[in-house]
Amino acid sequence: MRTSLPCFAAAAVLAGTVSVLAGSAARQTPPPGQPPPPQPQQPREVFVPIVGDIGAPPRLAITEFVALPNDAGGSGVADKETQAIAQTMTEVLWEDLRFEREFYLIPRDVVRTVPAPRAIDDVRFDRWREIGADGVLIGTVRKTANGLLVQVRMAAVRSKESAFGKEYSGTAANPRLYAHTAADEIHMQQRRLRGVARTKLTFASDRDGERIPGPIEARTIKEIYLADYDGANQRRVTVTRGLNNFPVWSSDGRAIAYTSWRQGYPNIFLSFIYTTAPPATPAGGSVRAHNWLAVWSPDGTRLVFTSNRDGNPELYVVNADGSNLRRMTNHSAADTTPTWSPTGTQIAFVSDRSGSPQVYVMDADGTGLRRITFESYADRPTWSPAPFNEIAYSSRTGPGHDIKVYEVATQRVKQLTFGEGTNESPSFAPNGRHLAFTTTRWGRVQVAVMGRDGNDVRQITKIGNNYAPNWSH
């Protein structure tokens, strides 16, 4: 099946599946005493899974993508650019599939002991069986007049059946996107898992080394950045030469809400990153009414944020267009850093009403308040997506902070980091299997990601100091 990139069309039938059709003869009146003939049925897809030994993940061999010559007949040799694209796609797809830990990836040096395929259908099943592969993935790349043509096929070694097959076409500007797309579709088709290869991170960074002019010392400029989930393609979103922080993705991934001091006081701005529309300020704001730390509701229609407009830091909810502003908390203590539950029916936040900052949960109408953490200091809660129903937060554990997770159903707390630097600002991936966070374990403040079990920590940023990551939906 062919899919065009970057505009991906919904697929009706997966290539590599088998459609079973009943006979298509016209209806006829059966002779007396005989049953009517069978009627045509709808096509039925036959799913071919890649399976491993009982209790073990499937063993998958990923071959090096084949760079095909530009001419369809294949009489020539692929140019260096096509070869580089093929290598990039091999490496990116490998890392994307490794990230979710759904497959055991046979080491690449072992894969290279099998003769490299020459085409998409060049599958030497006997050789793959020798190295213990349950499945083998082969990809090809060819330049076309309009960009690239990419083919990806995965076959089950034992049954010698095609388990996955897709063809993608589009621009050559971002070859990584082809690999990300294939990885997400493989995870969904084979493992019924929503992968995160095409998701993005946003964060604040002082990497540009600029400082805000004025009498106040140490006011480093922070701008909002975004990057692919694996840290590639880091690029700047704001150019304000001021202080910007706490970015959060909208549910449709087309806007980022963040706190900016560009007006001389903190206020909530919305940047629509795929349009030329100017930033919006739905919370209003003034020299006396400061707004900060906004978070989108799961349906993308509302924002909950902190404001001092009534004299004390309280939580408010406003529609994304600036209408229907409502106050949610009313306490002499400071209430801040809110996060929505995945259903939009509850809000967790931090308050020091008990004497130290702790995480509380209330219903979305402001009722049903209850305290859920009992730490020396808890901050920056983030609610996981369904079905995990967990709240991650940072907790003071000595001189620094660590990431902990509160299980809503059991009320148990588990710790994910253990003093490797200070670790703060957790944010769940959209499938709930990973968290982004900040850590000083490598010296400066950097963004990292890890599995929801605390394993497989990966550094995402390396330049400057980077803060408050948020994972797109």
Image: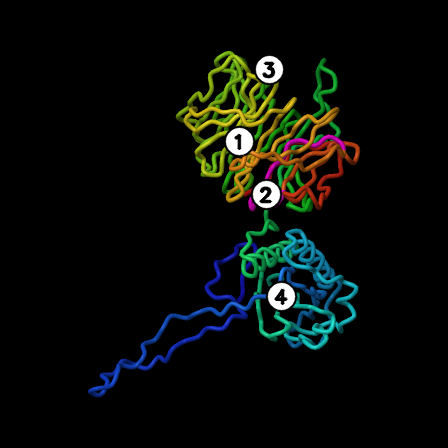
Where does the image place residue 434, in percent across and percent down from the top left? 62, 44
Residues under numbered marks 3 and 2 in contact, where contact means CB atoms less than 8 Å apart: no
For the point 49% across and 38% down, which residue is it? 342
Mark toward the start of the polypeptide (2 vs 1): 1
Q: Which residues are magenta?
A: 421-434
Where does the image place residue 369, in percent across and percent down from the top left? 47, 24
Q: Of discs 1 and 4, which sits in the foreground?
A: 1
Q: Circle 4 is placed at which residue position?
A: 144
Tell me how far mark 1 sits from mark 4, CA to CA.
47 Å
Q: Secondary structure at mark 3?
A: loop
Mark toward the start of the polypeptide (1 vs 4): 4
Marking on residue 429: 2
Q: Secondary structure at mark 2?
A: loop
Q: Circle 1 is placed at which residue position?
A: 339
Up the image or down, 427 lies above or below 316; here it is below
Tell me how far mark 4 sits from mark 3, CA to CA.
66 Å
Tell me how far mark 3 sits from mark 2, CA to CA.
32 Å
Mark toward the start of the polypeptide (3 vs 2): 3
The kind of residue on which mark 4 rests is: Thr
Tell me how far mark 2 sits from mark 1, CA to CA.
14 Å
Tell me how far mark 2 sits from mark 4, CA to CA.
35 Å
The kind of residue on which mark 1 rests is: Thr
Q: Nearer the viewer, residue 36 or 243?
A: 36
Q: Secondary structure at mark 4?
A: strand
